[in-house]
Amino acid sequence: MSLSSNSTEGHASKESTEQWSWLSKLFHWATALLIFIQIPLGFYADSLRLSPFKLDVFVWHKSLGMLVLLLVAVRLLWRIKSTIPAAVAGTAGQKLLAKLAHSVMYGLMLALPLSGWLVSSATNFPVKLFWLIPLPAISGPDEALKSLASEIHEICVFALIIVLVTHIGAALWHHLYLRDNALKRMWF
Amino acid sequence: MLRAAVKLTVTLVTALLWQPLLGADWQSEIQNSQLNFAASFQNLPINGRFKQFSVKYTTDQAAQPVDLQVRVIVASADMGNTEFNTEIQALDWFNVADHGTAVFTGQRFEIAPKNKAGIAFIAHGKLQLKGIEQPVTVPFSWRPIDHNQVSMSGELSLNRTDFAIGQGEWATGDQIGLAVRVWFDVRMLSNHD
Ligand code: HEM
Ligand code: HEM
């Protein structure tokens, strides 16, 4: 688990100095912040009784959620175009797990806003993101579809929470226990 | 005998041909009729419709309107979502428990400038909704489909607070707008044929 045990993989010394690009870091922490707001905000919005206040809270939830979709789309394009640092030292299993967790998080960050958008559309309720931009409906009013999309949205929320616990746990484990560069190279 | 038969035929044919000029009672046929409304949120429309309503219309010898009555079962309002449909029945909104039907009665009719859709009229009357009566003007077009079927269509705008719809915290138009667009396309059948 130490760097020396991975010497066979060659890049060990190079890995330790590699940094994420400035833009990748910005994307990561901006999305992370939005996700940390979105999860409690979603539960809070859902728990409110129908009132003008609830409608306002949902405008925020939908606006920030669609912002996540936009950020993730641009981020993925940037990820394809830019060079990304090689994987942090670890066993093949750990690398695979990290890669899997990252892919799943990208998938969920797309699936969450898309399913939310579908809930919103199928509910027959319009919205202007940030009180400015009308969000086009991606379906007509459809109760069955609404329930399905709502179910998917919720499953994605719980899946994301589980993966995030692992992800943050792994980052802290690298930083506090292994004392390697993993967190630092994603920090500013 | 033959004379009598010819005479009877002539009378019948004349009566049939003169039919439109004799005045008629018209009644809506629900399957081919729509009564829609659009509330708004952040100035974007939220569409709904009334699934149950009926229109009665009477014309005189000159095919001019003499009477118009529209009855709407308010609880049949459908906004495409069970949650909203339940919510709008409540006290702050339609209060259907106390005011199950809305009625529009035309009192005075005016011929509007002709338009593409057919002959157009303006019905001045009163609308009773949620127990409140207000003067309302309903413009409508009258477009024949065949000898005893006509399409009656039109559009108007109502202010929901005139009828105390959306009270309490909803009374300001900040989120749920005050103007509600109403439009209809009703298939009317003549009861003479
Ligand atoms: C306190 C919270 C967080 C910490 C400490 C953290 C830490 C990290 C670190 C250190 C990396 C770099 C891993 C590497 O270099 O291989 C990373 C990558 C990543 N993180 Fe986080 N993260 C946090 C929150 C989040 C959140 C909320 C999300 C989104 C749901 C997220 C999604 C991702 C993704 C998708 C990657 C992979 C980047 C890529 O390969 O393009 N992270 N995170
Ligand atoms: C990063 C993106 C998002 C996250 C993390 C997120 C999270 C949540 C959470 C935790 C809930 C409460 C639990 C639940 O009922 O599922 C929720 C509910 C909801 N979210 Fe999101 N959401 C996101 C994006 C969106 C977007 C973009 C929209 C709409 C455009 C949206 C619309 C809704 C709606 C309508 C609900 C109400 C509950 C339902 O019927 O499912 N969400 N969201």
Image: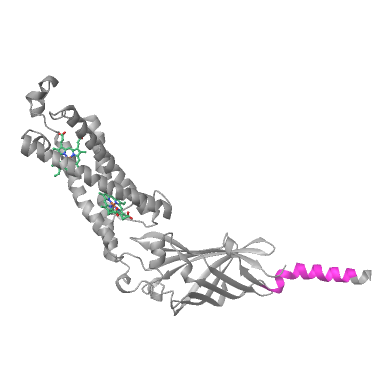
Task: Write the start and end of the magenta stretch as one range.
Answer: B5-24
Which image quadrant: the N terminus of chain B? Answer: bottom right
Q: How is the image coloured?
A: one colour
Q: Picture quarter containing residue A80?
A: top left
- Dominant secondary structure (helix, strand or loop) of the stretch shown in magenta: helix
Q: Position of residue A175 (x, y in %)?
A: 7, 37
Q: Position of residue B53 (x, y in %)?
A: 54, 69
User: Does the magenta portion include B39?
Assistant: no
Residue at the spot 92% in from the left edge and 70% down from the top edge = B3
The answer to whether residue B190 is visible is yes
Looking at the image, which is closer to me, B144 or B160? B160
Q: Position of residue A7 (x, y in %)?
A: 10, 21
Looking at the image, which is closer to me, B113 or A134? A134
Q: Is residue A45 left or right of residue B7?
A: left
Looking at the image, which is closer to me, A135 or B113? A135
Residue at the spot 32% in from the left edge and 50% down from the top edge = A116
Q: Picture quarter containing residue B187?
A: bottom right
Which image quadrant: the C terminus of chain B? Answer: bottom right
Q: Position of residue A128 (x, y in %)?
A: 31, 55
Judge whether B82 appears above or below B58 on screen: above
The answer to whether residue B113 is visible is no
Looking at the image, which is closer to me, A132 or A34? A34
Judge whether A15 appears above or below B78 on screen: above
User: Does the magenta portion include B11?
Assistant: yes
Picture mark count: 0
Q: Residue furthest right?
A: B1
Q: Is residue B17 left or right of residue B179?
A: right
Specify the quarter for ligand 1.
top left
Residue at the spot 35% in from the left edge and 66% down from the top edge = B177
